[in-house]
Image: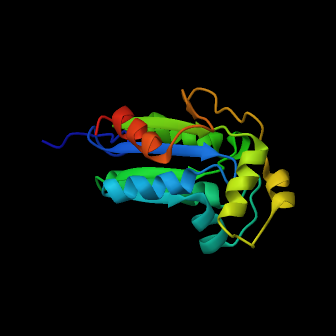
Amino acid sequence: MLLDRCVVGVGSVSTRLVVLRGNSGSGKSVIARMLRDRRELTVVSQDVLRRDVLGVADGHDNPAVGLIDLVARYSLDRGMDVVVDGILRSDIYGPMLQSLAADHLGITRFFRFDLPFEETVRRHNSKGCTDFGERELRQWWRDDDVLPGCAERVIGTGQDPDAIVDLIITALGW
């Protein structure tokens, strides 16, 4: 007998989804790479998909929102743990992130990097990046960009990167 079956959910109870959000220069990508060094997982980078793959500006109706969602869901459905990282403005990416979290069958955790503007500029300058500078960082700046309904843990200035990775690993039950 055939059963009419409606598949609901993304991933499985054993998959983990981590969302790292915050202003440019706050350390999200560093933490994502450190997590990948410790765990086998997929890093879904807003910068890579939006700038490098699609070559589009960040704004409402940009196709990166759907592509980030698609890559994260694809990876989770194949049993991979996923880290989504980027500025991920709540007004643009919020509905997609909320839907992804609601659909995910495993453990999902959100972390928001909340550092003073001056600290993000200092960190940006220490990387030697010449693609953009303080003017662009100021244009992109989002003060206290909370994502409603996602229980974000806040990462502040004084936290050591290894301690942040340990916090995330513990929060995910790894």
Q: Position of residue 26 (x, y in %)?
A: 64, 49
Which residue is found at the position 64% from the left and 40% from the top? Answer: 94
Lateral position of residue 86 relative to residue 129, left or right: left
Q: Position of residue 42 (x, y in %)?
A: 40, 59
Reply above or below: 6 against 34. above
Q: Quadrant of residue 4?
A: top left
Is residue 102 left or right of 138 when viewed as pictured? left
Would residue 45 be seen by someone viewing this image from the given angle?
yes
> How are the residues colored?
rainbow
Q: Quadrant of the C terminus?
A: top left
Q: Quadrant of the N terminus?
A: top left
Which quadrant would residue 142 be assigned to in this image? Answer: top right
- Looking at the image, can residue 73 be seen? no
Query: Which residue sits at x=30%, y=57%?
Result: 40
Q: Residue at x 36, y 40 (%)?
A: 169
Question: For this rendering, which residue is in front, 110 or 127?
Answer: 127
Q: Which residue is more in the foreground, 93 or 16?
A: 16
Depth check: give the residue in front, 155 or 96.
155
